[in-house]
Image: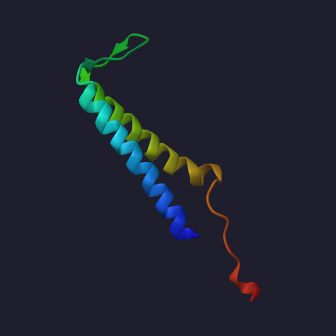
């Protein structure tokens, strides 16, 4: 069961990476963001998309143990 979960996870991540690559190639125009009074420098859309995906993955990896979404511990002492 663990192998199937790992395979599905790898396929989902590979699909996201492929989608980012395709979108990056098709949208090479630079973009800049403005939030309140702060404006970023112009970066290619694909680079912004890749950084956003990476920050989201890292944030989810950090949030899982902090919020208690980790896998339940097995108790092998019962056998």
Q: How many marks?
A: 0
Residue in the picture at 55% in, 47% down: 63
Q: Is residue 33 above or below residue 79?
A: above
Q: Position of residue 47 (x, y in %)?
A: 28, 32
Q: Quadrant of residue 78?
A: bottom right
* Along the line of sight, the residue nearer the viewer: 38 or 71: 71
Q: Is residue 77 above or below residue 33?
A: below
Q: Position of residue 26 (x, y in %)?
A: 26, 27
Is residue 1 in view?
A: yes
Q: Position of residue 5 (x, y in %)?
A: 54, 62
Residue in the picture at 43% in, 57% down: 10
Q: Quadrant of residue 53?
A: top left
Q: Is residue 63 above or below residue 46?
A: below
Residue in the picture at 66% in, 70% down: 73
Residue in the picture at 30% in, 17% down: 32
* Along the line of sight, the residue nearer the viewer: 39 or 43: 43
Residue found farthest to the bottom: 79
Q: Position of residue 15 (x, y in %)?
A: 40, 46
Query: What colour scheme does the image use?
Result: rainbow
In the displayed structure, does residue 18 sit left or right of residue 42? right
Q: Quadrant of residue 17?
A: top left
In the displayed structure, does residue 53 sit left or right of residue 42? right
Residue found farthest to the right: 78
Is residue 41 in view?
A: no
For the C terminus, give its image quadrant.
bottom right
For the N terminus, give its image quadrant.
bottom right
């Amino acid at each position: 069961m663990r192998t199937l979960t790992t395979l599905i996870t790898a396929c989902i991540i590979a699909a996201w990476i492929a989608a980012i690559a395709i979108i990056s190639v098709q949208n090479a125009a630079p973009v800049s963001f403005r939030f309140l009074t702060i404006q970023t420098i112009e970066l290619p859309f694909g680079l912004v998309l890749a950084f956003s995906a990476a920050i989201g993955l890292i944030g989810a990896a950090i949030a899982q143990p902090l919020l208690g979404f980790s896998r339940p511990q097995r108790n092998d002492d019962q056998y």
